[in-house]
Amino acid sequence: MAPSPVTGPRSDPLAQIPPPSERRLALRVNAAAQRALRQGHPWLYAEAITDLRGEGRPGDLAVIFDDHRRFLAIGLYDPGSPIRVRVLHHGSPTTIDRVWLRDRLLEADARRAAIAGTETTGYRLVHGENDALPGLVIDRYDTTLVIKLYTAAWLPWLPDLRSALKAALPGTGQASLVLRFSRDVKRRPEALHGLTDGMWLAGAPVEEVIFMENGLRFAVDVVHGQKTGFFLDQRDNRARVERLAAGKRTLNVFAYSGGFSLYAARGGAPEVTSLDASAPALAAAKRNFDLNRHIPAVAAARHTLLEADAFDALSDLHRLKRSYDLVIVDPPSLAAQQGQVEGALQAYSRLTSLALGVLAPGGTVVLCSCSARVSAAEFIATVSEAASRVGRPLHEIERTGHGTDHPVGFPEGAYLKALFATA
């Protein structure tokens, strides 16, 4: 049964947003930034700016020139962000308008054409910088689109973006639209023109949205859920877990809403334990299992919810001599800042040791990192060394990353890492 609307009709919340200035800012930048921009990098940091003509507001277009006044790039200016310009176009002058936005959306949609035949209605439609729309994420959950902004510079462009979505993707003309903000953007209420995180820009607000992923049904809270409500980037890795799960007692650590757990159950795992410190997350995991009880393997699997701190619970399970044939460890980002990298590596090391403490001999472990500041090489070296120290060296099956709807277009865009191994 579809949930009832939370509120009734309302006026267009985007009508109050002033449009970007018609006057473009002119910037000159240092030599290092010039090299990076010529190589197509999508970010210009504030400290790289050597000359700024005019005073800009969030969302104004900024044209970047080299030392010889030659065009380098054009992008969205944000005076309140360390990333002062999110670059939209490199190399030669161009017009940034609703038509330009429509064309970028068409290109992004074309990159995801293969998803159409996979019984999937939930995926990332726009992956920010990697789809030439830096600072902008659009996730699709069936007929609901969630727009998440990582810079206030996109706010004046929201009316054009909404129109471009309708023009580029006719099927979204009647879609519900939800607006989400990153933590940094939420800290700047003066730049938001009265808009709030979780606001419905179109459609009747509902408490949950149900979508399909590889034939499985998931319920998602698009207003309050982490990211835009679901970790869509792990879709391909969840499918890999399903192929490995037959007959294996499975432990899903940092389970959130039970994505890996549900795939393991459909793959034939007789017992699945979802471990998370959040009671609402585990309630969502139970809800997702209930949505798929019509699948015989899911109905047959014994699903246990364990609400606890991951580190404490893994230690307790080891002490109780519990063991599992398949252990998945997918923690949240542990290094939001560069200064947190060393602590993150220590946490990955400890989690690996604890996970192997409950892994049955010859079992399979899946270790993940979504910390962009931790490189793949650092992550693999850390977990491998931890495994060797406890006498359970890892025998690699494969290394993976993002799903196909999360393309990587620049070095900082490669954040997700996963190692499948036996021990």
Image: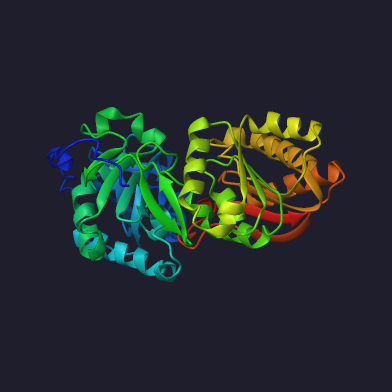
Residue 94 can be seen, yes or no: no
**In the rendered picture of this protein, how many numbered marks are placed on residues?**
0
Q: Nearer the viewer, residue 186 or 139?
A: 139
User: Which residue sits at x=67%, y=57%?
Assistant: 245
Asked where in the image residue 114 lies, by quadrant, the reply is bottom left
Is 373 located above or below residue 240 in the figure?
Answer: above
Q: How is the image coloured?
A: rainbow
Asked where in the image residue 80 lies, by quadrant, the reply is top left
Is 248 located above or below residue 77 in the figure?
Answer: below
Q: Nearer the viewer, residue 245 or 299?
A: 299
Q: Nearer the viewer, residue 161 or 94?
A: 161
Residue 176's x, y, as percent?
25, 50
Q: Is residue 291 left or right of residue 163?
A: right
Residue 341's x, y, as percent?
63, 37
User: Which residue sits at x=17%, y=47%?
Assistant: 23
Q: Is residue 321 left or right of residue 275?
A: right
Residue 349's x, y, as percent?
73, 39
Residue 241's x, y, as percent?
63, 57
Residue 289 can be seen, yes or no: yes
User: Which residue sits at x=35%, y=55%?
Assistant: 133
Q: In the current view of this chain or complex, which residue is farthest to the right?
A: 391
Is 101 located above or below residue 359 in the figure?
Answer: below
Asked where in the image residue 352 lies, by quadrant, the reply is top right
Q: Is residue 407 left or right of residue 158?
A: right
